[in-house]
Every structure is written in C-alpha cells, then in structure tokens.
Image (cartoon, rainbow, N blue to C red):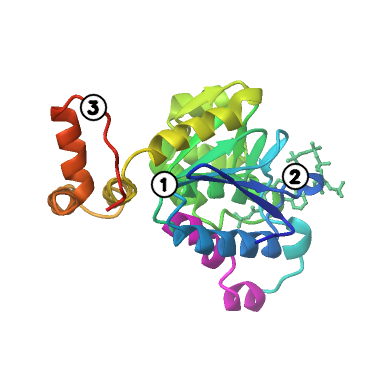
Amino acid sequence: MTYENIIVAKHGKVALITLNRPKALNALSPDLTRELGEALDVLEIDPTVAAVVLTGSEKAFAAGADIKVMKDWSYMDVYSANFITATWERIAKFRKPTIAAVAGYALGGGCELAMMCDFIIAADNAKFGQPEITIGTIPGAGGTQRLTRLIGKSKAMEMVLTGRMMDAVEAERAGLVTRIVPADQLISDALKTAEKIASMSMPIAMMAKDAVNRAYEVSLSEGIHFERRLFHSTFATEDQKEGMNAFSEKRPPVFKDK
Ligand SMILES: CC(C)(O)CC(=O)SCCNC(=O)CCNC(=O)[C@H](O)C(C)(C)COP(=O)(O)OP(=O)(O)OC[C@H]1O[C@@H](n2cnc3c(N)ncnc32)[C@H](O)[C@@H]1OP(=O)(O)O
C-alpha cells in the first residue's frame, strides 16, 4: 500500500515506518495518524512481519499534533472524534514488538507516540518534551501518564508544567530511552535491534511483550500470575521445543513461529 504521509518499507521481517511530513517537522495531522493506523492494521496480520521500527527525519521524529489543523476545533469537535487517543493508541495496542527510533524533536504528541512504542532508541540530537502547556493545553495522548511512569513524578511534572525539553543524555539517564546512538547510525542500529527480535519466535516475542506491558496495568501478584500463565503457554508451542532442543544439541534454533 502507498501512503501520502508515511513510508512503509520492509527489511527482512522488519517493517520500517517513516513519518514523512518533513516540512512540518512531521506534525501529526489526522491524515498522518489515520495512515499510520491503517498501516499498522496491515502489518499486524502480515505473517512475514515480526517487528516494526517507527522513525521520522533527522530533524524531527514528530513535533506533536498539528497545531494549525486543531487550533480552531471546538470542544464538540475533539470530544466527538475522541481526539486524540482513538487513532494514536493503535500503536500502543499493536501486538508485535515496536521500536521508536528518535532523532531531533519528539515533542507533544511526538513524544507520546514514541512512548507508545515498546522502547525508544535515541539519536544523540534527540530532544523530548511535552510543551502543550506553552500553547494553552495539556498532553492528550498519554503524556501525563506514560512519561510519569517512565521517568517518575518530579521530572514528568516539571516537563509538563514548564514545557522544558530533555536532551538525549538526560532522557537516557531518566529511563525514557534505552540507549543513545550517533544520529547517522540511528536507523541501522534500530533495524539491527528489530532484526534481532525478529529472529526469535514471533508468538513468544508477542507473549513476552504482553507480559512486560501487563506490569503497567495490574498489581504485582496479578502480573506474576499473568506471566506464569503465559510462561506455561510457551510450552504449547513448537518453538519452545525447538529452542530448548537446539540448546541441548548445541546448534542455533530454527523457529517456525508456531
Ligand atoms: C497530542 C497532544 C494532544 O498532546 C497535543 C500536541 O501535540 S500539541 C503540539 C505540541 N508541540 C509543540 O508545541 C511543538 C511546536 N513546534 C515548535 O515548537 C517548533 O516548531 C520546534 C521547536 C519543534 C522547531 O522550531 P524551528 O526549528 O524554529 O522550526 P519551525 O520554523 O518552528 O517549524 C518548521 C515548520 O514546521 C511547522 N510545525 C512545527 N511544529 C508543528 C506542529 N506541532 N503543528 C503544525 N506545524 C508545525 C512550523 O509551523 C513550520 O512550518 P511553516 O510555518 O514554516 O510552514
């Protein structure tokens, strides 16, 4: 499928989605987020895709929701359309592993979109922020919740109340990003990481993702119960047999995603 605001390319079992509105710093217009949702719908059921990398340009991952489009919307416009979570949450609900490869600005909805991915790899020029307060609103796509869980209340509160941006080094120290790489190596590093994940058994990787994500939703005992049930389920797969037999036979496993 072709899209106007995003580019989807396959690299083996990894799909690379590039946000492609460079002149507007990848401002997240309704058309862009609709296309992103449509692409994810296709990729989720594509058995040849095992992981997704989401990226933007070297200057901006995404500078947030499109302010020029939304500035005159009324309460009823945003309420009726359930702006903004409805379409954007699609990536948070995506069942296969996702990596945000962030260079440049990840602001407002851009930061929120990156946080909806499973983890973030940052270029050394990355800048994260929730500047909504500077334009008279607040984060509306999970920023107050996900940022707080990832970096703690003090830092999240300061960023949300002042609109201050965090550079890559601070973001890594705070736990927002998994690691920093030179900007010119961002895509290759993210693809390599995604390919590593894609070399595992896809259903097992999906279960692992599901289990980690559950930690954000339930109590420790419920989470451990959920994890144990999924762990038990892995023994119903051919890939668990293959993985453990391959270990015993001192050979690399050949997973069949079954
Ligand atoms: C999702 C919610 C609900 O949480 C809400 C949001 O996301 S609200 C949006 C939050 N984001 C922001 O407030 C960031 C807005 N952008 C900026 O502050 C600056 O553009 C910058 C600091 C990221 C970069 O500054 P600079 O290098 O000086 O470039 P600009 O000339 O400002 O921008 C270039 C070009 O892009 C357009 N642009 C940038 N961001 C947006 C945006 N969020 N919406 C729409 N358009 C955006 C900017 O207007 C420029 O275009 P032209 O005016 O030159 O055509």
Magenta-highlighted residues: 75-93
The residue positioned 47% from the left and 45% from the top of the image is 13
Is ligand 1 within 8 Å of the beta carbon of the residue shown at mark 2?
yes
Look at discs 3 and 1 and give the one toward the viewer: 3
Decide: few, some or many residues near mark 1? Use Cα within 10 Å; few <14, some 14-19, many ≥20.
many
Label 3 near label 2: C-beta < 8 Å?
Answer: no
Q: Earlier in the sequence, mark 2 or mark 3?
A: 2
State the residue position of label 3. 251
Is 108 drawn above or below residue 46 in the view shown? above
Main SS type for the magenta part?
Answer: helix
From mark 2 to mark 3, how far is it between C-alphas?
47 Å
The amino acid on which the numbered mark 2 sits, given as a three-letter code, is: Leu
The amino acid on which the numbered mark 3 sits, given as a three-letter code, is: Arg
Is 174 drawn above or below residue 148 in the view shown? above
Q: Quadrant of the N terminus?
A: bottom right
Tally of numbered discs: 3
**Among the 4 quarters of the image, the one containing residue 243:** top left
Q: Earlier in the sequence, mark 3 or mark 1?
A: 1
State the residue position of label 1. 97
Q: Nearer the viewer, residue 258 or 150?
A: 258
The amino acid on which the numbered mark 1 sits, given as a three-letter code, is: Pro
State the residue position of label 2. 25
- The picture places residue 248, in percent across and down from the top left corner, at 13, 28
Q: Nearer the viewer, residue 235 or 164?
A: 235
